[in-house]
Structures are given as structure tokens and as C-alpha cells.
Amino acid sequence: MKVIKFGGSSLASAEQLKKVLNIVKSDSTRRFVVVSAPGKRHSEDTKVTDALIKYYKHYITDYNFSEDQDWIINRYQSITDELGLRPAILEEIAGAIKDLATLPKEDNAFLYDTFLAAGEDNNAKLIAEYFRTEGLNARYIHPKEAGLIVTSEPGNARILPSSYDKLEELRESDEILVIPGFFGVTVDNHICTFSRGGSDITGSIIAAGVKADLYENFTDVDGIFAAHPGVVDKPHSIKELTYREMRELAYAGFSVLHDEALIPAYRGQIPLVIKNTNNPDHPGTRIVLEPSSSATPVVGISGDNDFVSINMSKYLMNREVGFGRKVLQILEELNIRFEHMPTGIDDMSIIVRGRELTPIKEQEIISQLTRKLEVDEVSIERNLSILMIVGENMKSKIGVTATATKALSEAGINLMMISQGASELSVMFVVRTEDEKTAVRALYDAFFE
Ligand code: ASP
């Protein structure tokens, strides 16, 4: 039994929906279909979710929103018309879109989420109708009926563990259930969304809930590439990688799947496959629980920018009990997350994401390090990038880092910091952002060409 999730670009037009129908029809074990809202048809297009945000903003500021309503309804209409669906379904969708503008504005913490969720909710109704028209025994099911109960955190919902028992009952259904992604319902019956891109999370939760044999996540690429295709010319797509490897790669720039989507499927021990709606015969990338012994030591290379290093040095730092704690406390009080903390004997660097460090916070850190901790030197270095080579089979393999550093030195790149955790799952290099692309290419060539 499979749970299959389609992203917005796979559902953006009637043409795409025909591909989706064929994919669902071609395998009778595809029993649960989780859908996003219609996405972009081309790069200049607007996603329905973004149009709903605009509609919401106009509604709460008492601005004229009729154009927003029309745009969204037309978007669905262009699909229903081309698929030749009966008018009643469009009427139902149009009614639901218009009804949003009758909801109370005051004291309604879930209003924004309710607007946003309408994108997936109405798309699920449309798709179930289309499947039925084409002879499938399909039914739309609302997350409340399915039992997808979430915490009351608008825009950042989390599944309540107690939901899983109810979700398991869905296994009994003999219909193809079409479930809107991206949101659940709170105990008090409010619509509450996951963070943006959260339909992946719904798919993962449903897969864990119904104890699926496989969670298929359909998008518009042939799986996960071993390096960013915008940097490396035609990188290969990875056949198989583990959840842990995926997490490491996602950390530094691999954004095919929502970060939080891995957790439910991983805990439920459900394998996941990322596939391409536009090329469904391609095997895609499987994400599995344990690495296969035949996997190469490095499976992927990622790179991400906008890191900042806060560097400090103090003579005899290593003898000062509590120094590290005091540094981290300064960051904690300023509500700054840190990413890495490479150290020397008398020096320490704290690496944070650039967006965390506003100029005011930067000044505050410098002043506190100098006054309270009496460091000898402190400097802030911006425009840094992090490169990661990732692979479970690197563990206990000799020479992997040597291959990487040799390639980087031959490309004339200065390595500012290196770090490898005890898990040996990844090695991280810090370089200047101006060197990032050259470095990723050099590493790709060294490990894969
Ligand atoms: N439609 C939502 C968004 O654009 C969720 C999703 O597509 O996964 O963020």
C-alpha cells in the first residue's frame, strides 16, 4: 500500500493532472493521494497559496479583494473547464473561496491559516472529482475526518501523536482517498497549517499513520541530485540515500523535500521515494533506513551560503572553566541559534546564519565579549559558505577527507575551517562564498567523475 504525494507544479494545470491520473491509475496500490495547491505553470506564474496570502491581506485591511477572489477561482476554473468536469464542482470551489471573506477578523488566530489551507483543500476536492469522472473509486477526505489533529500553533502546526491510531483506520477504506496537504485541525476545530511547503509533511504523516509500504513524493525533478544542478553541469541523481544522509544534505541547501517531512516517515520506518511527475519511469531517489554496503562513501555534496563566523581569541582560553558556556549564553540571551563551533586552543569561532545576526546584535556580541569575557580579539567574518560531503559509508574509510582537501587545494581554494562529527556522516568545510561554486565543482569531480 502506497501513499503518494504530488507537489504544486505537478498539479498546476489540466495537462499536469492528466499525468497525475495516469500515475495513480498505473498502480492499484496507490491508495492515498496527498495534494498541494496548484503551483506555478511557468516561472513568472503565481502559486495559488501566494494568491491566497494576497487575498487575506486585502481582506483584513478592508481593501477591495474581489480581483483576488476572481483570480483564484479562475485558476481552478481553467483546470475544471479543460478537464470537462461538471459545473457543480467549480461552484463548490468558488463558494468556498468567497466564504473565506465572511470569517471573523477579530480574535481569530487561525484566519490566515484558514485562507492558506483553502488552496490544497479545494484542489483535493477538484482532483477527487476528476478521478471519479475518469472511473476511479476516489473520495476527497478532510483532515478532520481523516483524524489529522495538530497542535494549536498557527503556521507551524505539529501532529499530535494521538492522531496516529485514528489515521490507521484509513487502511480499511477501499476507496482512493484524496487528502489535502499542508494543514490539520486542532482539538478545538481550527484549521492550522504546517510551515510553508508543508504538504510533504502531510504525506509523511499519512504514510506513517496507515503504515504504508512506501511514501512516494512526486515533484518535478528526477529525484535528488548529488550536487546542485545550478552549480554542477548535469549532476547524476542519487539512486538511494539514507534518512540521515538526507537530513545532512538538506541542512546545507538541498531543498527537494521539506525538512520536517522526514521525521514521521523515518519514525514509522517507511521508505520514501522522490520521483518526477513529468518522467515517471525514472526510478528517482529512494530514501531508506540503512545504507547499502555497495553505496559509495560520499553520496552527495552540498553547499550553502550566508554564514557568519564570530571569531574570538583569548590567551589561556583553554584553562578558563565556563568560558564556552558564557559565550553561548550571550547568544542565547540575544535569541541567536548557532550552527557550528570550531575551536583552537586559545580561539573559538561560532558560526551562525547571516540572517540571525542583525547589526544591533552584532554590536552587542562584540561589546559583551570584550567587556564581560575580556577576550583579546574579536572579529566578525561575513560572506562565508559551508560545503558538506555526506555519506554513511565514509565511516572508518581512510582517505575521504584527503581526496576532498586535495581537490580543493588543486582548485586554489583556501579552507578556513574543517569539522567532522563523531558519526563520520559528513565533513564540513568553510570557504569564502566567492569560492563556493568552484569548490563544489572540484569536489563533485573528485568523488564522481
Ligand atoms: N501550498 C503550500 C505552500 O505553497 C504547501 C505546499 O505546497 O506544500 O507552501
Image (tube, grey):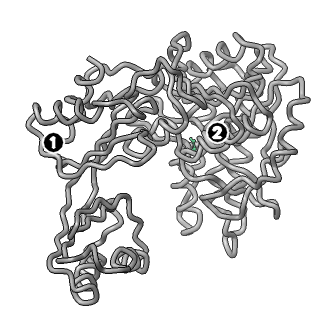
The kind of residue on which mark 1 rests is Asp
Name the quadrant containing residue 335. bottom left
Task: Name the residue nearer the viewer: 354 or 33.
Answer: 354
Q: Which callout, 1 or 2, points to the residue nearer the camera?
A: 2
Residue for badge 1? 435
Task: Name the residue nearer the viewer: 189 or 417.
Answer: 417
Name the quadrant containing residue 167. top right
- The residue located at (19%, 68%) in the rendering is 380
The kind of residue on which mark 2 rests is Tyr
Q: Ligand 1 quadrant?
A: top right
Name the quadrant containing residue 332. bottom left
- The residue located at (56%, 55%) in the rendering is 55
Check the picture and name the quadrant holding the N terminus.
top right
- The residue located at (72%, 53%) in the rendering is 159
Look at the numbered disc 2 and give the secondary structure of its residue.
Answer: helix
> Sequence order check: which comes first, mark 1 or mark 2?
2
- The residue located at (52%, 36%) in the rendering is 39
Residue for badge 2? 266
Measured Cα–Cα span from mark 1 to mark 2: 35 Å
Q: Say whether residue 304 is left or right of residue 278.
A: left
Check the picture and name the quadrant holding the C terminus.
top left
